[in-house]
Every structure is written in C-alpha cells, then in structure tokens.
Amino acid sequence: MRKAIPILIRISISTVILFFLFKLVDLNKIVLIVSQANKVILISVFLLTLLCYIIGFLRWRMLLIGFGLNLTPSLIFKSFCIGVFSNLFFPSTVGGDLLRGIDLGLRTHQPRRVVASVILDRLSGYSALVVVALLALSFGHRIINDIAVFIALGVILVLLVGMLTILFNNFIFSKVTRLLHFLGKIGQALSNLHYEIYNFRNQRKIIIKNFFYSLMVQLAMPLSFYLISLSLGTRINPIYFFILVPIISAISALPISVAGLGLREASSMYFFTNVGMSGEVALTVALLAFFMFFLIGLAGGIIYVLTFSQHRI
C-alpha cells in the first residue's frame, strides 16, 4: 500500500487537473473540432512522432557504444520499447528511462554503464530542448508579452547549467565524490556512476553527434504541435510553438502526474490561449499530441511482450 500511495496521488493530480480543464471548455466544440480535423496532417504528425522515437533509439545506442557496450540492435531495441511503454504510466519520462536502464543493465550485467548512458541520453535531450527554446526566443521575443515565458525559460536554463556543472566540472566532481563516500555502499555506487558520466566528456565526437540527434527531435516536437493546430484549422505564428512547446515539455516532465497528463494540457491552454488560440483548440492539440505518444507507447509494449521470451543475452 505504501508503494501504491505515490502512484495514486499522481493519478489523482492528473485526474483533478483534467477535470477542471474540461470544465473550462465546451466539450461539444472539442468533439466537433476533432471530427473536422485534417486526417492526412494528423497521420503525418504520427509519422513524425515515430521518427523522433527512432532517432531516440539511435541516440541511445550511440551512447551505449561510446561506453564500450557493443550490443545487438535488437537487444537495445527491446529495452527501449519497454521504456517507451512505461512512460505511459510512470511520472514523467524518468520512470521509463529508469526501467529501460534496469532492464538492459540486468541483461548485460553492466548496470552502471547502462544507467550512465540513460542519464546522458536524457541530458542530451534536455540540452537540445533549452537550445531550441532560447534560439526561438531570440527571434520571437518581441511578440512574447507573457513574463511567465521568460521566467520558465530562465528556470530550465538554470537547471541545465546546474546539471552540467555537477556532472562535468572538475572541482565540483571532486567535491561530490568526497561527499558521496560518506553514504556507504549507496554513496559508492553513486560515485561510480558519476565517474562513468564524468569520464564520458572525452567522447567529444559522440557527444556532438548525439546532441545533433537530440536537436532534430526537439525541433520536430514543436513542429508536430504546429501541424496538429493546422489540422484543426488554426493558424498562429509558428515561432510561438518553438518557444512554448519546450517549456510545456519541461513542465510535463515534472514527476507529479502520470505521463504528464494534466500538466501538459494545463500548460498548453495557459500559454497558447495567451497567443491567440482558443481554449478548446489548445486543449485538443495537447490531447492529440499525447494520443500520438500513447499509440507508439502501446506499440512498444506489444513488441516487448511478444519478444520477451527472446530477450536474453
């Protein structure tokens, strides 16, 4: 029961937020909007989302190779699939990352390097998210009148600088290592993990290429939101999506709801209605974006289950 309580709390938060959001909009309008959506554009969004996951798989495999884990693509893909599926139920994407790391770590008997690769994979994506948002803001800051946008971007930038400093700064690394030694076996395990990540800074070619892959994903995400809005017959300046979607993604990653449900929709409604989108369309865009993730996550779960008996090394 104690383990179930945090899950129930997150489900409750998602449910309550969605309940109040649906109270703020006209459900009949949402049904009408969805029924009149351009299905061809929505299919293209699904394919674009699928491409992002394929790039994500290649990005993770690249890091694993950088850590000296030359595993078969099929083995990595199966663990990647369980991570994608788990993201539908865990708080934010961290839960899915943890599960794919544990799954592949147990298969390879190299949990430290696998987990380090997962952390760097997530850090690469977050770094690209911040870069996309800041570049877009540099072009569109004159049309942004909401101070919350600047505050949110400032927060995620500070978080990124903090993580990079802790993981890769030589002085901070030595201090963190000494501190972790006082935590016994757990501290030693964390110190070893930190050591793996810190040493990876020498793999510059892989880091640059990995970041390029992440940049493609983070550019595709705002584009997918923009295309969804087009499919619903709404046209606003595309630069808004490249500024706001990274912020929405960062908010959705907070581990207080299930799969970002509620947080994604609430932040989408707040930011997009402030730039001229109706509440019904903003909510529908967020829900359709989640539906794309849900379909791919479900497919990942099916693939993992069907190949589970072969998932050995």
Image (tube, rainbow, N blue to C red):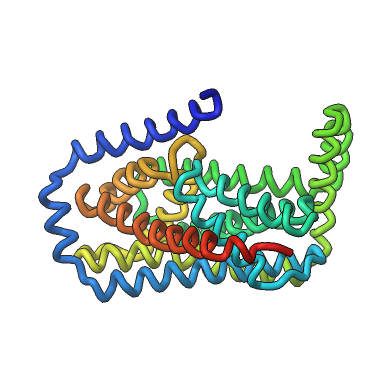
Considering only vertical position in the picture, is 278 above or below 76? above
Considering only vertical position in the picture, is 50 above or below 263? below
Query: Closer to the camera, 94 or 164?
Result: 94
Task: Please name the residue shown 79% across and 55% down the image.
Answer: 109
**Farthest residue, direction front:** 309
**Farthest residue, direction top:** 2
- Residue 147 seen in the current view: no
Total numbered labels placed on residues in the image? 0
Q: In the image, 91: left or right of 165?
A: left
Q: In the image, 87: left or right of 112?
A: left
Task: Please name the residue shown 56% across and 45% down the image.
Answer: 95
Considering only vertical position in the picture, is 209 above or below 111? below
Residue 173 x/y as whole percent: 83, 43
- Residue 69 seen in the current view: yes
Q: In the image, 173: left or right of 34?
A: right
Residue 305 x/y as whole percent: 52, 59
Query: Closer to the camera, 303 or 102?
Result: 303
Displayed quadrant of residue 184? top right
Residue 94 x/y as whole percent: 57, 46
Task: Please name the residue shown 51% across and 38% down the image.
Answer: 255
Query: Closer to the camera, 47 or 136?
Result: 47
Residue 313 x/y as whole percent: 74, 64
Task: Please name the residue shown 80% across and 34% down the image.
Answer: 186
Q: In the image, 169: left or right of 242?
A: right
